Amino acid sequence: ADLSNGGALSIQNNVGSISVSVWDRDEVIIRHMKMVTLSFSLWSDFEEPQFYLDALEVIVTQSDTGVMVETAFPSTLYPDVAASVALEITAPENLALTIEQNVGQISVENVTGTMNIDLDVGSVEIVHPYDLGPAESVNCSVDVGDIELSLPDTSSFVIEGEVEVGHIDGDDFNLNVEEIGFVGAEVNDEVGEEGGAVVLRVDVGNIRIEAL
């Protein structure tokens, strides 16, 4: 799918993994691997596995503003079938990136621009290759799991982070992390001047901000 540098890329997945990397072309390449697990029982009456793989869809929609990638599976019709999709996406470097996933892992490497990532259960790893510019932002939320954000050691940024149950490690940037009660932590700090905005939130888990 065609996508110009600075365009919008939206990804929605239920269960599985999402990996986003970059290249120097104005297009998006989407590779995927589908997986289904059948829970056999005395009352189960299954079709062949290929039937469920065909029902598990990867839908790509292109518009004037960007590209949307989403997965769909009629889980209410097949409650004994667990379906997941591993997505590997290559896109232009500068993006307005939005990712939503229920369960699994998310990896974003070398993307610049704006990121909005929402994960229910799992882990998020973000590697930002350059100093975070004033117009750039990283907004990431995980209900249960971990966030790891890697930035150049020369980066300037304003950070707001909170973990309700867990730990925040910002030692690489000497962040002022404060405890919340006996089980949580928060950080509201600024590194350098005129940097981008970082907002990280975890209900149960950990946040780590490390220097490259």
Image: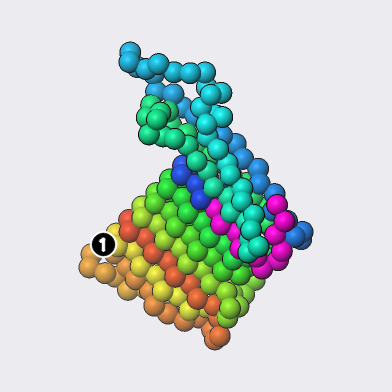
* Residue 207 screen position, x and y as percent: 42, 62
* Residue 132 screen position, x and y as percent: 59, 75
Q: Residue at x 61, y 48 (%)?
A: 60
The one nearer the camera, 71 or 101, is 71
Q: Is residue 7 magenta?
A: yes
Q: Main secondary structure of the magenta part?
A: loop
Work out which quarter of the rendered image holds the C terminus and state it.
bottom right
Q: Which residues are magenta?
A: 1-11
Question: Mark 1 — residue?
Answer: 183
Q: Is residue 4 magenta?
A: yes
* Residue 73 screen position, x and y as percent: 47, 37
Q: Residue at x 72, y 56 (%)?
A: 2
Up the image or down, 165 lies above or below 15; here it is: below
Q: Residue furthest left?
A: 181
In the picture, measured across the screen, residue 185 lies left or right of residue 1, that is left
Is residue 158 among what the camera can see?
yes
Q: Residue furthest bottom?
A: 193
Residue type marked 1: Val
* Residue 26 screen position, x and y as percent: 75, 60
- Other-residue count near label 1 (Cα within 10 Å), few / some / many at <14 / 14–19 / ≥20: few
The one nearer the camera, 163 or 66, is 66
SS under mark 1: loop
In the picture, measured across the screen, residue 116 lies left or right of residue 40, that is right
The one nearer the camera, 17 or 56, is 56
Instruction: Answer with the quarter of the image where residue 6 lies.
Output: bottom right
Instruction: Answer with the quarter of the image where residue 134 lies.
Output: bottom right
Q: Residue furthest right?
A: 25
Q: Residue at x 48, y 18 (%)?
A: 47
Q: How many marks?
A: 1
Q: Residue at x 62, y 75 (%)?
A: 131
Is residue 20 among what the camera can see?
no
Up the image or down, 1 lies above or below 139; here it is: above
